[in-house]
Amino acid sequence: MKPPTPQGLRALVRGTLSRGRADALRARAAFAKGDAARGRELLLRAVLTDPNAAWRLDLAVDRASARGDARALLKRLDALLARPGALPAAWVRAVRGETLRLPALGRYAEGLAELRAAAALEPGTFWVRAYLGRAEFHSGRRPQGLTALAAAERLAPACGWTRAWRGEALRSSGRPRAALAAFDAAERLDPAYHWGYAWRAGALLALARPRAALKDLERFLAVESGYPWAWRALAEARRRLGDADGADAVLRKVARRDLGAAPGGDGGRGARHEKRQWSAAAADFAKAARSARRPARAWAWQGEALLRLGRPAAALAALERSLALAQDDGWARAWRAEALAALARPEDARAEAARAVRLDAAYPRAWAVLGLAERALGRAESGARCLERAARGASGAAWLHGWRGEALLAANRPAPAAVALERAVELDPSFADAWAWLGEARRRSGDAPRARDAFARALALAPGHRLARLGRGLMTGAAEDILAAGGAR
C-alpha cells in the first residue's frame, strides 16, 4: 500500500477535526433541548475524535459564566457528581474547578484543589492537565503551571489550544521568543483557536514586530470584539508604526467601554506589565506630539499614560500643552481633573471634571472622576449619581461599582449600596474594601449573617482592614476589634 502524502495526511486530519467539532455543536443543541443522554454521547465522541474540541467540555454542563449564572452551574455540576457514570468524574471535577475560579464565585483555592483532584483521577487526560496548568500559573505557581502545560502538550501533541495556553504563560513570564514558537505551532494545529492570535500579538509587540502584531490583532478582533486588551494592543501596534491618529481612534473607541484602572490605582493584577506598556506609550506619544498632524491629541494621550504611571505633575504639564491647542477636548479635561485630584486639589478637580462632562457626556471616565471629586468634597449623594451615570456606559469596572456603593453608604442608603457592592465583588472577588463596605451595608440593613460573611471575606484578604474589624467588633462585641480599628467610622 502506498504511504499517504503529507498533503493527504493534513486533509485526513482536517476532516477528522471537522467531524469532532460538528459533534461538539450537536452536543450543545442536544443539551439545550434537554436530551442529556444524546448530548453526552456526542460530546464523548467529539473529545475522543478531536483533541482541540476538548476545551468545549463545558457544553456538557451548560456552563453559564457568560450569563453570570455561576452558582446555578455549580449546582448542576454537583448533581452530575452525585450520579456516577453520567460523565467521567475527572471531567466534571475539572469543569467544577474552572467554575469555582470564575470571578462571580472567586473560590480560587478551592477550584485549584478540585483541578488537582481531577488530574489525580486521570493523570493521562491532557486537557485536565492543561486546565490544572493554567490554574497553577494564575495562582502564582508559575513553574508548576508551565510544567503541567508542557505535560499536556506531550500527552496530546496534535492539540493546538494547549500550545496556545503554554505560549501565553511563557509570554506572561517574559519569554516572548519561546512564546512565539508555541503560538506558531498552535496556529498550524488549530487555526480556528482565535485567542492564540491575540496572545501572539503580545509576543510580537514585545519582540518589536508591530506590523505582524497588527495583522494578528485585526484577525482576532474580527471574531472577538469585546476584549479591551486587544484594542489597546492594536493601538500600541499602530502607535509603533507611526500612526498616532490611528492609535488615537482605537483608544477612543475602547475607552468608551473600558474604564481601565481606578483613578490613583496601581492597575491590579498584571500591573508590572501594564506599566511597561504605559512607559512605552508615554515616550511614543511625546515623540508623536512633535511630528503629528494633530499634536494636541498626542499630548493628551501622553498625559493619560503618565497618569497611569503615577506621575500626576508630569501628566498635568502634558495635558495643559494639549488643552492649549484644543481647549474643547472633554477627554483631556477629564484626565486633567484626575491629575488635579491626585495633586490634592479637589475643588479644581471638580470644576474641571464638570467641564469635561459638558464637553463629552458620553465618556464614562469623566463622570467617574466627577463622582469621586464630589465624594472627596463630602457630597456623597451627588457623587453616587455621577458614578451611576458612569456605570451606564462601562458596567464592567469593579472599582466603579465599589466606589458608587461607598458613596451610597455615606449617603445613608445601605440597600442600594449593597446592590452596587455585590456587583463590585462579583467582578473582583479580591476587592477587600468593597467586601468591607458590603459588610457595613448589610449590617445597617439588618442582615447580620451575610454582614459577618462579608467582613470575614474582607479580613481574609486584608487582615488589618479597619472598617472590617470595626464592623465585626460591633456585631460580636469584641473589644479588641473595636480598639484595633482605632474608632474608625
Image: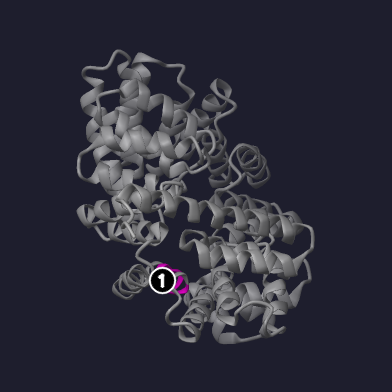
Q: Is residue 113 above or below residue 36?
A: below
Q: Residue at x 27, y 17 (%)?
A: 292
Locate residue 262 relative to residue 60 in the image: left or right: left
Is residue 179 visible to the viewer in this orientation of the structure?
yes
Q: Is residue 469 above or below residue 344?
A: below
Closer to us: 189 or 145? 189
Locate residue 104 relative to residue 111 in the image: left or right: right
Q: Which residues are magenta?
A: 128-135
Q: Quadrant of residue 235?
A: top left
Which quarter of the figure is the N terminus placed in?
bottom left
Is residue 316 visible to the viewer in this orientation of the structure?
no
Q: Where is residue 85? Give x, y as percent.
A: 67, 82
Q: Residue at x 38, y 37 (%)?
A: 217
- Is residue 87 magenta-colored? no
Locate residue 481 relative to residue 61 in the image: left or right: left
- Is residue 134 magenta-colored? yes
Q: Residue at x 52, y 59 (%)?
A: 53
Q: Is residue 155 above or below residue 269?
A: below
Count of labels in the image: 1
Closer to us: 169 or 4? 4
Badge 1 amino acid = Ser
Residue pushed farthest front?
Answer: 1
Question: Which residue was labeled with disc 1?
Answer: 139
Q: Where is residue 322? Give x, y as percent.
A: 34, 21
Closer to us: 149 or 332? 149
Q: Main secondary structure of the magenta part?
A: helix
Q: Residue at x 32, y 71 (%)?
A: 154
Q: Where is residue 44? Give x, y as percent.
A: 60, 69
SS at badge 1: loop
Closer to us: 383 or 402? 402
Q: Where is residue 337? Give x, y as percent.
A: 45, 34
